[in-house]
Image (tube, helix red, strand yellow):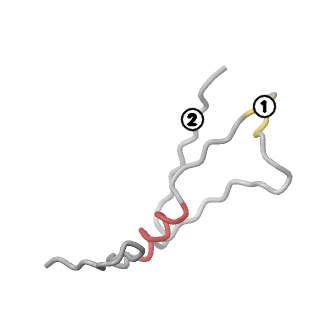
Amino acid sequence: MLCNAMRITASVFINDDAHLKRTIMGQEVAVAITEGKLDFGPCEQIFYGEFDGMRGKRVLVKIIGE
């Protein structure tokens, strides 16, 4: 079966709430480090959101550079 929205500004998708939220929210962030500290603005923070129930969590933090 093919389902086409037939409009350039429309989309068709299968709704799977967890994957859709991840697509909108993103999966990774890059943050600068200055003088050994995360270089955030005054209101910025890193948040982790789990959208698929109470599964085990794993986060990878990789520091690249000097």
Say if 37 sits above or below 46 in the image.
Answer: above
Helix, strand or loop at disc 1? strand
The residue carrying pointer 2 sits among few (fewer than 14), some (14 to 19) or many (20 or more) residues within 10 Å by Cα, namely: few
Residue with the mark numbered 2: 62
Of callouts 1 and 2, which one flags the residue occurring earlier in the amino acid sequence?
Answer: 1
Depth check: 12 or 26 in front?
12
The reply, left or right, for residue 5 in relation to residue 49 is: left
The residue carrying pointer 1 sits among few (fewer than 14), some (14 to 19) or many (20 or more) residues within 10 Å by Cα, namely: few
Q: Which mark is residue 65?
A: none
The reply, left or right, for residue 32 in relation to residue 58 is: right
Depth check: 9 or 31 in front?
9
Residue extending furthest toward the left: 1
**Exactly how many numbered labels are in the figure?**
2
Image-quadrant location for residue 46: bottom right
Percent x, y for residue 18?
A: 44, 72
Q: How far apart in space, not on screen, are marks 1 and 2 (Cα)?
A: 15 Å
Depth check: 62 or 10 in front?
10
Image-quadrant location for residue 17: bottom left
Q: Amino acid at mark 1?
A: Thr
Percent x, y for residue 57?
A: 51, 57
Q: Amino acid at mark 2?
A: Lys
Which residue sits at x=13%, y=79%? 1
Which residue sits at x=67%, y=20%? 66
Residue with the mark numbered 1: 34
Which residue sits at x=81%, y=49%? 41
Percent x, y for residue 23?
A: 46, 63
The label nearer to you, 1 versus 2, is 1
Helix, strand or loop at disc 2? loop
The reply, left or right, for residue 66 in relation to residue 53 is: right
Residue extending furthest toward the right: 42
* Image marks 1 and 2: residues in contact by CB distance under 8 Å: no
Say if 51 sits above or below 30 in the image.
Answer: below
